[in-house]
Image (cartoon, rainbow, N blue to C red):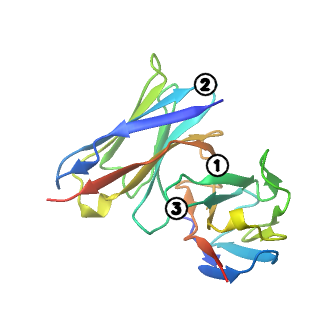
Amino acid sequence: QVQLQQWGAGLLKPSETLSLTCAVYGGSFSGYYWSWIRQPPGKGLEWIGEINRGGDTNYNPSLKSRVTISVDTSKNQFTLKLRSVTAADTAVYYCGRGYGSGSYYNYWGQGTLVTVSS
Amino acid sequence: DIQMTQSPSTLSASVGDRVTITCRASQSISSWLAWYQQKPGKAPKLLIQKASSLESGVPSRFSGSGSGTEFTLTISSLQPDDFATYYCQQYYSYSLTFGGGTKVEIK
């Protein structure tokens, strides 16, 4: 059974860097794309970006200048970094497994609420 | 980016009702559409991919149809566990985008 477990800081000040890590348990780490998706409180879902085992990435153009997604294949983990956060980045952040590049998501992490406040 | 528009945004229905949610794409996405169910405080759950393929374990009362720019999610007989918010997602092209959601409430 595939499980995604995510963690990271939940409270940030404006201008700081958001950092979240997602660990994958069960199943294969290869052959899939590993993504980050966020959801502001009471709002809809926004795709942030994805990475595969080989480090190939795709990002949402609206966030691309501030986002880096990296992968640690030795630990079956991938990490999101979002620089220069503002209150607009307050959201629940989810990690997810895409069936392929630019795909749907059949496995999700539990979500992490990240609040940006001075 | 391809814009995904769902309607209605809120739907009030009773147990046993037939419910239909519509998702429209700003350009053709062929059949590259997924549907998710989300309950409060939980991650979305994949129901349907490629517009009409039901995920394993999802009750058969859920069905999806459509292609091109117009898609529907139908619940044939609404059950108490189905009260939730539903999202569509296109994966035809980057940037992947979601609809704004349809909240199914108890009437």
Closest to the observer: B62 or B65? B62
Q: Residue at x 25, y 47 (%)?
A: A83
Point out the image quarter for the C terminus of chain B. bottom right
Label at residue A104: 1
Q: Which mark lies nearer to you, 3 or 2?
A: 3
Q: Is residue B21 left or right of residue B76?
A: left
Distance in Å between CA atoms under marks 3 and 2: 26 Å
Label at residue B48: none
Residues at discs 2 and 1 in contact (Cβ within 8 Å):
no
SS for tag 2? Answer: loop
Residues at discs 3 and 2 in contact (Cβ within 8 Å):
no
Distance in Å between CA atoms under marks 2 and 1: 19 Å
Closest to the observer: B98 or B103? B103
Subunit of label 2: A
Label at residue B40: 3
| Residue A2 spot, x, y in % from top left | 62, 31
Subunit of label 3: B
Q: Residue at x 47, y 20 (%)?
A: A73
Who comes first in sequence, dot 2 or dot 1? 2
Distance in Å between CA atoms under marks 1 and 3: 21 Å
- Tag 3: Cα neighbours inside 10 Å, few (<14), some, or many (≥20)? few
| Residue B36 spot, x, y in % from top left | 65, 58
SS for tag 1? Answer: loop
| Residue B43 spot, x, y in % from top left | 54, 52
Q: Disc 2 marks which residue?
A: A26
Q: Residue at x 29, y 47 (%)?
A: A10
Q: Amino acid at mark 2?
A: Gly
Q: Amino acid at mark 3?
A: Pro
Subunit of label 1: A
